[in-house]
Image (cartoon, rainbow, N blue to C red):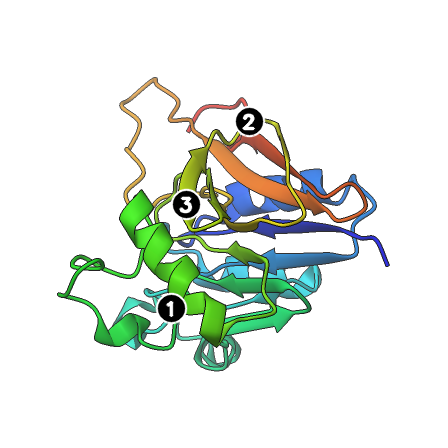
Amino acid sequence: MAELIAILSDVHAYAEPLARALEEIQKECISQIYFLGDITQGGGQESECVKLLQNHRVNSVAGNHCRQSKNWNTENAEVKKYLKNLEMVINVGDLCFSHENPLKECKTRYGREPFAKDGGIRDENQAKYVFEKALSEFPATRLFFVGHTHEPVVWQFCLGDVKKLQADKEVQLIDRNKYIVNPGAIAGPHVPVAKRGEHRTWNASFVFYDSAHDKLLFRSVPAQSSGKA
């Protein structure tokens, strides 16, 4: 059955941009929403963000910050339980949702190439490594949705070659190829503080996957209202 799903990532405890993104997403006839992790560490609004995700029935996975209880800026027992129970990976048909690369070895490869820094997918070598390993670990998966790097990007895997595609408003996919898709971020952990009289601003980005037409639709909204910070 053809569906339109929404995917967003990396809110880092900023409730307003998450609310604005979810409001925009709900304007479409969507079947599911997936959040790729990192609710915590940044804006100090973990409780508000968790409530938003719950109220919109968002399917969520754990980000690297969510996995570290020292980053939970909340005493709310329900929120702590929510964060503690998040899965690392969600698989639905030929779709896979995770925060960093989804390989089982992900956490054990830190400090070794090609993931010397962390499990984020930032270049062609890292993308190719994941694609090739996933052939055996995720043989039925065609689209991998990942976050962490905060950069909207699409990696395409075709006949052993990897190509970085521009994350334009619309990206048409090809049936025989596999893809890694990063929707970008709702907010970063270190959003610049506005100076007196100024308004800090950034765009909260996310992506729709239209399975009926096999395409990605990248979207963004202003993270804050037009009022002063």
Which quarter of the figure has residue 134?
bottom left
- Where residue 192 appears, x then y in whole percent? 28, 33
Task: Give me the residue at 19% from left, 67% from top.
Answer: 110
Q: Is residue 82 visible?
A: yes
Q: Dot 2 corresponds to which residue?
A: 168
What kind of element bears circle 3?
Answer: strand
- Where residue 98 appears, x then y in whole percent? 48, 64
Q: Residues within 10 Å of mark 2 (few under 14, many from 20)?
A: few
Q: Residues within 10 Å of mark 3 (few under 14, many from 20)?
A: few
Callout 3 amino acid = Asp
Out of 224 and 136, give the one closest to the viewer: 136
Q: Check if mark 2's residue and mark 1's residue have beta carbons within 8 Å.
A: no
Mark closest to the chain's N terminus, 2 or 1: 1
Mark closest to the chain's N terminus, 3 or 1: 1
Q: Is residue 179 above or below residue 88?
A: above
Q: Extreme left residue here?
A: 111
Q: Dot 1 corresponds to which residue?
A: 66
Which quarter of the figure has residue 13?
bottom left
Q: Dot 3 corresponds to which residue?
A: 161
Query: Which-is-in-front pick, marks 2 and 1?
Result: 2
Callout 1 amino acid = Cys
Task: Give me the residue at 56% from left, 41% from top.
Answer: 206
